[in-house]
Image (spheres, grey):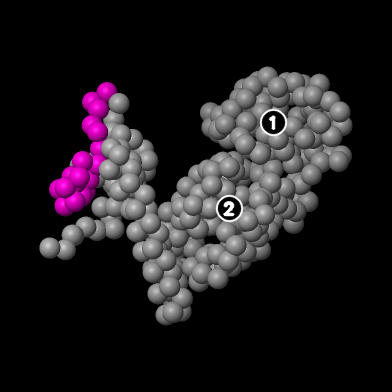
Amino acid sequence: MATRFTLRQLEYFIAVGEAGSIAQASDRVNVSSPSISTAVAQLEDEFGLPLFVRKHAHGLSLTQAGKRFMEQAKKVLAEADALNHLAGDISGSVRGPLAIGCLLTFAQVVLPAMRRLFETNYPDVRVSQYELHQLEIFEKLRRAEIDVAISYDLDIPADLEFIPLRELPPFAMLDEEHPLAGEAVVSVEELQKHPMVLLDLPHSSEYFLSFFTKIGVKPNIAERTRDMAVLRSLVANGFGYAIANLRPQIDQSPDGRRLRFVPLVGSVRRLRMGLVVPEGATNVLTVQTFVEHCRSVVDDWGFPGLPLPKDET
């Protein structure tokens, strides 16, 4: 008798295997916990395999059979995605799944509006998004877990392609009472004398610190964080300045305190925001259409809902 299972069941199973718990998998795929539990139980019944060891205090862990099963399940989903892409290319319609990664530092500012307009224009595309740091973007693109990512041109490896969208200058982010808050521009030499809050993400932190290395000085790092919202709050509450390349529309921290953004001058490298894709990915119609959509959005608006800095217009 033929084995019966659905791609959705495999998707839920993989989510549980990677998350280690039903609850976390539920948050990840935005499906109720009972639905995920049922899907996993149905797979175990259908194949006659125990896929997980259930530990009350420590969630779920894959059995040896479950690990091998997950490897194959990922291949099945990848092949199903490839069939969807192929069908779209043959029919000339933009349809099927599209997994988009976005760098953590600006995921909340750029991706939602860009995605909303794309889904409105192409309702047959099923978009999923992932907020990642730069190394995770590279890894997931290579494993075909995402199709395209919005990121900066930070250390892009040779096996991935970078498609530039917009050049962004660096700013010093300051609280209202900071001694440099009233300046029209500020140099790295001036910042070096004050405490710094560092956005401590792979590749991003190296970029910010390179400003100081280039002039032979060390910053006074007072705080480190991997979260952009926490960074803004630490700065707004006087723990130090930070450096950023994307200015939010509202110059406020999450707790409502005011921020000042002062352009950095001197020998400071601008970053380019763009799309990172595997080689040949733009031959896929859905990916190609998303690339063209992003170019159009950036050309027309600068960023969705975000006016460009004066020197960028």
In the rendering, which numbered label is found on residue 242? Answer: 1
Badge 1 marks a residue whose secondary structure is strand
Of residues 184 and 111, the one nearer the viewer is 111
**Bounds of the magenta segment:** 37-57
Task: Using the image, determine if residue 287 lies above or below residue 203.
Answer: below
Amino acid tagged 1? Ala
Task: Using the image, determine if residue 19 lies above or below residue 4.
Answer: above
Residue 305 in view, yes or no:
no
Please check the rendered image and state whether residue 69 is part of the magenta-colored stretch, yes or no.
Answer: no
In which quadrant of the rendered image does the C terminus lie? bottom right
* Left or right side of 163 for 220: right
Badge 2 vs badge 1, beta-carbon distance below 8 Å: no
Q: Which residue is mark 2?
A: 150
Q: Nearer the viewer, mark 2 or mark 1?
A: 2
Of residues 65 and 44, the one nearer the viewer is 65
Direction left: furthest residue:
1
Report the Cα–Cα distance between label 2 and label 1: 22 Å
* Left or right side of 129 for 150: right
Count numbered badges in the picture. 2
Image x and y of residue 188, in percent: 82, 32
